[in-house]
Image (cartoon, rainbow, N blue to C red):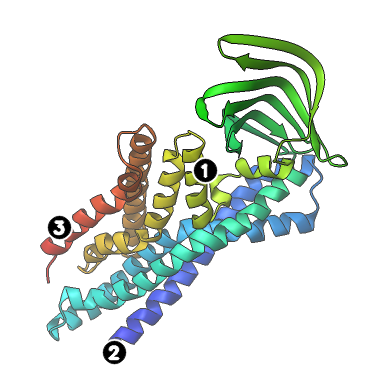
């Protein structure tokens, strides 16, 4: 490794850290101003607010890392270009590819770590963040636009519209039992407006519903005000786990959820998109650096302001491509893998064209 490589890597890493700290400080101040009324209205203790932003940091670091890496690469290169050091390196025989090497190698290591960081560390702290929101900011009711479907046994499917954590009450419930010898034949169905769990008897009590029994072509319906079921195999915690946000799930949990969704007859596309997008986003640093670095090797007027402007344009364009691809993916136009990697593919092609046209 040449002395210039060590110098570039050192300046690159120091600038990344400085950019991250700056972006995080700005983000926390803006978010605090946005949520200060909620903290005050709910009498959230100062220590809890402090803990809230501590556990929020990994998620913010995940989002800000590609921006910080790109800004650091542009800033370091722009500074060297203004001091004519890039010109001196080129005059000594160093090509553009050789100059970019320490930046790319460092960014590859950052991206590989970002997969683990965004796939496991960030979701773990997000669980604590959501727990604080639920306990102190009255975000206690889980609701879902679509029913929560899960398989309670090999022959039983349960659907629940919403669940209140504080009252441990489920709303709009349907429990369907099927013939084990013919899974297309429904034997029994219970529909109820609400359901509560009794921890002492480890059973569920359903209120205000109808129980239907099917035999051949006949149906028998019995209305009930209250009925207790002790043969259900799930507890309130299982329902809550079914409604955990994607941001709280690790990569392994997302894969498991996708399998469960598929087994329950649901479409796992959105979960798969989240899985592939999270991995692809970890490599956003490499793609944006490949795209933006050649732009700053030539000396231009504007200095830091220009580098910051280039950073914003590239980042904004990348996020637009990512949003568009996810919209198409969620509508079934693109596969989850292509949806997650579409922005990276487009920017990688643009980066290669940009590098090919840049003076060597």
Q: Nearer the viewer, residue 247 or 237?
A: 237
Place of residue 145 in the rendered image (x, y in percent of width and height, measured from the top left): 56, 28
Instruction: Tell me, for residue 1, which label it has, or none.
Output: 2
On screen, residue 33 versus residue 272, left or right, reads right
Query: Would you say residue 192 is visible in this rendering?
Result: yes
Q: Is residue 19 above or below residue 215?
A: below
Q: Identify which residue is drawn at 76% across, 12% down.
A: 223
In whole angstroms, how far apart are the C-alphas of marks 1 and 3?
Answer: 42 Å
Mark 1: few, some, or many residues within 10 Å (few <14, many ≥20)?
A: some
State left or right for residue 110 relative to residue 191: left
Which of the labelled discs sits on residue 353, or is there none? 3
Residue in the foreground of this view, choosing between 237 and 333: 237
Residue at x 48% of width, y 65% of height: 116
**Which label belongs to residue 260?**
1
Place of residue 348 in the rendered image (x, y in percent of width and height, measured from the top left): 24, 57
- Mark 2 against mark 1, which lies toward the viewer? 1
On-image quarter of the C terminus: bottom left
The x, y position of residue 235, in whole percent, is 73, 41
């Amino acid at each position: 490794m040449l002395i210039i490589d060590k110098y570039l890597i050192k300046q690159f890493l120091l600038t990344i850290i400085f950019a991250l700290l700056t972006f995080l400080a700005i983000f926390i101040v803006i978010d605090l101003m946005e949520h200060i009324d909620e903290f005050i209205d709910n009498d959230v203790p100062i220590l809890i607010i402090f803990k809230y932003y501590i556990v929020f940091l990994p998620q913010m670091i995940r989002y800000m890392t590609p921006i910080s890496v790109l800004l650091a690469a542009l800033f370091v290169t722009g500074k060297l270009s203004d001091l004519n050091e890039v010109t001196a390196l080129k005059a000594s025989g160093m090509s553009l590819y050789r100059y970019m090497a320490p930046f790319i190698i460092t960014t590859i290591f950052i991206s590989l770590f970002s997969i683990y960081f965004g796939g496991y560390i960030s979701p773990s702290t997000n669980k604590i963040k959501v727990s604080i929101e639920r306990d102190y900011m009255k975000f206690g009711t889980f609701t879902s636009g679509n029913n929560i479907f899960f398989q309670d046994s090999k022959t039983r499917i349960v659907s629940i519209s919403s669940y209140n954590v504080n009252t441990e009450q489920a709303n709009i419930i349907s429990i369907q039992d099927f013939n084990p010898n013919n899974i297309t034949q429904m034997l029994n169905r219970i529909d109820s407006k609400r359901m509560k769990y009794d921890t002492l008897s480890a059973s569920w009590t359903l209120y205000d519903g109808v129980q239907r029994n099917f035999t051949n072509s006949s149906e028998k319906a019995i209305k009930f005000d209250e009925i207790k079921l002790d043969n259900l195999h799930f507890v309130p915690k299982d329902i809550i786990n079914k409604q955990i946000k994607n941001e709280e799930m690790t990569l392994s949990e997302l894969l498991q959820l996708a399998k469960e969704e598929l087994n329950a007859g649901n479409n796992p596309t959105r979960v798969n998109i989240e899985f592939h997008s999270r991995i692809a986003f970890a490599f956003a640093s490499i793609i944006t650096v490949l795209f933006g670095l050649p732009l700053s090797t030539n000396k231009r007027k504007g200095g830091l302001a220009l580098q910051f402007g280039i950073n914003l344009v590239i980042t904004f364009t990348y996020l637009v491509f990512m949003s568009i691809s996810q919209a198409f993916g969620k509508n079934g136009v693109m596969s989850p893998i292509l949806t997650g990697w579409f922005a990276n593919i487009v920017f990688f092609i643009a980066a290669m064209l940009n590098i090919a046209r840049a003076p060597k």
